Amino acid sequence: MDTPHLLEAIDVHADRLKTAALTAGPHAPIPNCPKWTMADLVTHLTEVLSYTIDAITGHHTERRPTEWPDLLGHWDGARLVVRDILRLPADHPVASPFPHGGTITVGDWTRRLAHEFAIHRLDAESALPTPRRTRFPTGFAEDGIDEYLAFLTPRRAPSPERDGVVEVRAGDRGWTVVLRRGQGPQLDESTPGTPDVTLTGPADDVYRALWGRPHAAGIVGDDTLLDPLAAP
């Protein structure tokens, strides 16, 4: 996806998330994230926004608020700043929060935020008295799968305890992830043979499955090999 569409996605999903947060209130439990309340979710995302400002500008933001009205105000202010700084050149460097993978750019982080807010939008909406039946467009969900497997997983996933091959399929698109002990999971489209486990389904469901959210994707084979890919 190009930068204008990713920036638009950030705005859309952040707005929907905030609407759900205001409706449910700070003490609402998050069924998708059982250890969190809505306040915890919004706090996490304000920290992501604050990190974005720090990592791109080098200027440390003020102390994060804890009271709900102040937290929402911080959210609004940080979103305005982030919207501006994400319009820097796509190759502008960003300090990486990940243990592996080297330098990242504003373009990488714009994509990361689009999918961070999309997935957490689902979490916020799961807390509503009548949860919304949000479905992501195929192109956006496919981009989310690719971002998860090609960008995020190699940078943050631990080394697997055993070797294996994971095939992920969404419609006509496919990804092959190779697991090797002592190495982080890596995409390798040239790997021959039969995969040890296959995750398949509509792009929206596969996207949710990778992030550990409720889904209707199918899993065939040794599902324990999906553990190294699991979202935190």
Image (cartoon, helix red, strand yellow):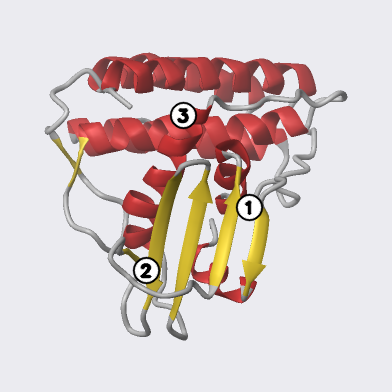
Residue 128: % across, % down: 80, 26
Q: In the image, residue 170 lies at what x, y percent?
A: 52, 44
- Mark 3 element type: helix
Classify the position of the N terminus by image quarter: top left
Of residues 180 and 173, the one nearer the viewer is: 173
Left or right, residue 135 beside residue 103? right
Amino acid identity at mark 2: Pro
Which mark is on residue 185? 2
Q: Which of 112/215 is in front?
A: 215
The answer to whether marks 3 and 1 mark residues whose Cβ atoms lie closer than 8 Å is no
Where disc 1 sits, the SS reads loop
**Residue drawn at (63%, 42%) of the image:** 205
Q: x%, y% of residue 5?
A: 36, 18
Residue at coordinates 40% horizontally, 53% vertically from top-left?
149
Q: What residue type is labelled 3?
A: Phe
Q: Earlier in the sequence, mark 3 or mark 1?
A: 3
Write down the residue under mark 3.
Answer: 140
Q: Determine the CA span between mark 3 and mark 1.
A: 18 Å
Q: Which of 154 and 125 is in front in this view?
A: 154
